[in-house]
Amino acid sequence: MDTLVLKFGGTSVGSTDRISTVAEIVKDASKEAFPVVVVSAMSGETDRLIELAHLFSSEPDKREFDALISTGEKVSASLVAIALNQLGLKAKSFSAAQVGLKTTAQFSRAKILDLNKEIIINTISDGYIPVITGFQGITDSGDTTTLGRGGTDTTAVAIAASIQAMRCDIYTDVDGIYTTDPRIVPEAKKLDSISMEEMLELAGQGAKVIQTRAVEFANKYEVPVRVLSSFEPGSGTMILKEEEGMEDAIIKGIASQKDQTKFTLHGVVDTPGIASGILSPVSDEGIEVDVIVQNVSVSGKTDFTFTVATEDRQEVEKVLKDKMTGISYDELIVDESIGKVSLVGVGMRSHAGIASTAFNALADAKINIQMISTSEIKITIVIDVNQLEDAVKTLHKAFNLDK
Ligand code: ADP
Ligand code: ASP
Ligand code: MG
C-alpha cells in the first residue's frame, strides 16, 4: 500500500479558507497514494496558549503546560477532517494518544519513542484518511507531552518512517528551502534539492523551516522529505540522502538564530575536568549546550563560556547553582544579547579559506565576532544579536548566494 504523509504547518491551517485549500491538496494527493495528514495548530494559537499560561506563572507546572499547549492541534485536526468530509472524502481525526504515540517524559522537549502504526494502517484500510495531531505524544503513564516548537515536522516524519510512506511532504508558507531565510534576505534563492547532512546543520542552527529532529528521523529511516508551499503550486525542495549530479556548492546555505544566551564563568580555577564539571549537570537536564569556548588560563584561572537557547536560561542558572560541584569561579556573567550565524555546505570540506572570507566580510561590515565554532561542513559565529540580520545579508552576498 503506497502511503504519502502530508504535513501542514500553522499558516497552512491558519483560517477556514486555508483549511479548505488543505482539503483540496489532500484530495489531489489521494490520486497519487493513500494520504495520511499531520497538522499543526492554527497559526498564532500555540503562542496564545503559552501566553495564557504565563499570565498565571512565569514557570507553570510542566505537565499542565504541555496539556494546555497541545490543544491547538486537536482543533485543527478535527477541522481538517470536517473539511475533508465536506469534499466527499472520508476522514477521521486522531490525537497522538489515540495512535499510541509514546514519548520520553521530558515535558516540552519530549522525544518520540514509538507509535502504533496498525491504527493508522487499519484506518486507511477501512477507507478513511487519518488526520493526526502533530507536536505531541503521551508518556507511558499517559501524560501529554510536546515535542518542542516546530514539532509537527517531527511527528510527520516519524509517522512516515513508521508506515514506510513513499514520501513526507512538508507544506508550509514558503515554496521550498532557500539559501537563507527569504524573510531576512529577499534575494535568497530557492534550492531544488539539499542533502540531509546539510539540512541537518541548517535546521540545527536555526533555519526553522523544518525541525532538526525531523531531519534526524528522515536521515535515520531514509524517508524522502519534500518542503513545499500550500499557498501556490510548485515542486518545492527535496531533502535527499545523497545529493547526486551537480558539483557541491561550497556554501549551500546560511542559518541564523536569535534568543541565545551566553554564560561565562569568569576566573574558573583551571583543573582537569572543568568542562565536564560545568556541562555534565546541564546536559543531564536535557538542555542542549551549543557553542563552547574555554580560554587559555592565566595564573591558573580561565574563562569558560557556553551558549544555550534563552528559553533554557533559568534552568541553566538553577543547575549551575544547585548541581555543579567542585568548580570554583569568581563571577557568572549572563548575556542575552547574542545571536548566531552559521554557514553550511558539504563543499566546505574540500575548500580552504572559507572562514577567512567570512571573517573579512564581517570585519568590513563592522560586525564584531565574539565566538567561533567550526565543524567539517559548518562555521558558526556568535555576534551581537542587533547585528544578526546584517551579518546574514553580508555573508549571503560575500559567498554570492544571490547569484
Ligand atoms: P510552519 O508553520 O509551516 O511550520 P515555519 O514558520 O515553522 O512554518 O517555517 C517556515 C518559515 O521558515 C518560513 O516562513 C521562513 O521565514 C523560515 N525559514 C528560515 N530559514 C529558511 C530557509 N532557509 N528556507 C526557507 N524558509 C526558511
Ligand atoms: N504548533 C506547534 C508550534 O507552534 C508545533 C508546530 O507548529 O510544528 O510550535
Ligand atoms: Mg514549523
Image: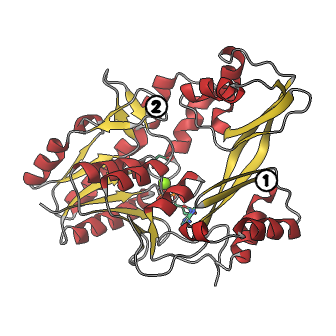
Residue 271: where, in percent of width, then height?
Answer: 76, 23
Q: On the image, which quarter does residue 94 sit in?
A: top left
Q: Which of 95 and 367 is in front in this view?
A: 367
Q: What element carries label 2?
A: helix
Residue for point 18% across, 66% down? 33
Image-based side of 271 in relation to 366, left or right: left
The residue pinned by badge 2 equals 66
Q: Which residue lies furthest to the left in this view?
A: 126
Q: Is residue 21 left or right of residue 203?
A: left
Q: Is mark 1 within 8 Å of ligand 1?
A: no
Q: Name the residue under label 1.
A: 383
Q: Earlier in the sequence, mark 2 or mark 1?
A: 2
Q: In this view, does 114 lie above or below 329?
A: below
Label 1 is placed on what type of residue? Ile
Q: Which residue is drawn at 14% across and 43% down?
A: 118
Q: Which one is in front, 261 or 39?
A: 261
Q: How crowded is mark 1: few (under 14 residues within 10 Å), some or many (20 or more)?
A: many
Decide which of 239, 76 is in the foreground and name it.
239
Q: Tag 1, which secondary structure?
A: strand
Q: Can residue 181 be seen in this view?
A: no
Compared with 375, 331 (above or below) is above
